[in-house]
Image: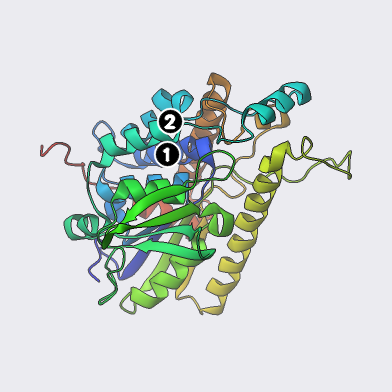
Amino acid sequence: MPSTQPRNVFRVLSIDGGGFRGLYTATLLNTLARRFSENSDVPLDIGKKFDLIVGTSTGGILACALAAGIPINDISNIYVKHGKDIFSNPQPENKLKLLFWGCANKRKNSCDAGKLNAILKSTFSDTTIKQIYTNRNIALCIPTIDAVTHHPWVFKTPHNKGKNRDDNYSLVDVCMATSAAPIYFPIHECASPDNKAGKQFFVDGGLWANNPVLIGMAEALQINQNKEIEIISIGTLPAPVGSVIQKVRRGLLDWKFGAEALLLGMDAQASGYDYTAQFLATSLSGKCTVIRIDKNKVCPSPDQAKCLAMDAADDCNISVLTKLAESAADRIHGEEMAKINRGEISIIADIFQNLTPLKVDGK
């Protein structure tokens, strides 16, 4: 597979899920691009610096947008301008209000999937996953779950010869499928592109691969042409260091009708997959490097953490996510300027330096 990199390296970008917290990832990427590139006053083509992009849930939307050549500012604006319309009914913290919230949503999802679908349609139009690869030569892997069989499903561009199952799925359906988080969004129903009479049903890939780094590693090992592999993995914020357990007997309200348990599982899985990927990379004798780009760079304070619900699109969340992402990017850039931690930082700098301007609307 051809690579856009001057070095003999195969580069992978892996993006976690996390609902509205995808704004953190978009801001982090945008700030790194502006700090390191000399062309910071024009839209920059971050996606072209990678041979393969994997992303789950909100990370899947970011992955598809980067592969499609959508300006990173446009991606951030989806969260800032439309977040309140999509996440229109966030879970309240107050127990009494939460009880009423649960009763009001006992037979429906809490977020507006129709609004999300409309925004994705305006962003990607009818572009298929095959067309992205044909037009941009960037491979994609987007995990979801087949709700009928309960088996994992990974939407893939046709970067492996002879594997064309997903060619005709639209990016809109791919993004809706990977982000169909239980409680928040409905199961995504779509027509099979190869059998219009058939229906398919998908649930959020974050239930099994919220951190898709292992998918990226496995795919890279399969398709790269004997090149060194460099994987940049980005979370939607570093996992908290722990919790104060004041109550062990918990009911539906304590677990926020399952949402708190869902978040706990996603955070633990993201951390566990990162550790496993690092261990496997070490076992590959220098042929693979995995960098968790924001690991140990910044962590929300207890007050900031109160704002960071997956379905909260308020001004507090926007402010905290933006500031923490900019802080993480500034620290990475500062370490490069001071020549600190040269191994990982030099790889990040090499990626984000000299980004090419992005062609927008044919210009």
Please tell me whether mark 2 or mark 1 is closer to you in this view.
2
Mark 1 surroundings within 10 Å by alpha-carbon count, few (fewer than 14), some (14 through 19), many (20 or more): many
* Disc 1: which residue: 26
For the residue pair 239 and 62, the one nearer the viewer reads as 62
Q: Are marks 2 and 1 in contact (CB under 8 Å)?
A: yes
Residue 55 seen in the current view: no
For the residue pair 41 and 87, the one nearer the viewer reads as 87
For the residue pair 352 and 66, the one nearer the viewer reads as 66
Quarter of the image where one finds residue 96: top right
Secondary element at tag 2: helix
Q: Position of residue 80 (x, y in %)?
A: 43, 26
Residue shown at the point (45%, 51%) measured from the top left = 178
Mark 2 surroundings within 10 Å by alpha-carbon count, few (fewer than 14), some (14 through 19), many (20 or more): many
* Screen quadrant of the C terminus: top left
Residue 146 seen in the current view: yes
* Disc 2: which residue: 79
Residue type indicated by callout 1? Ala
Secondary element at tag 1: helix
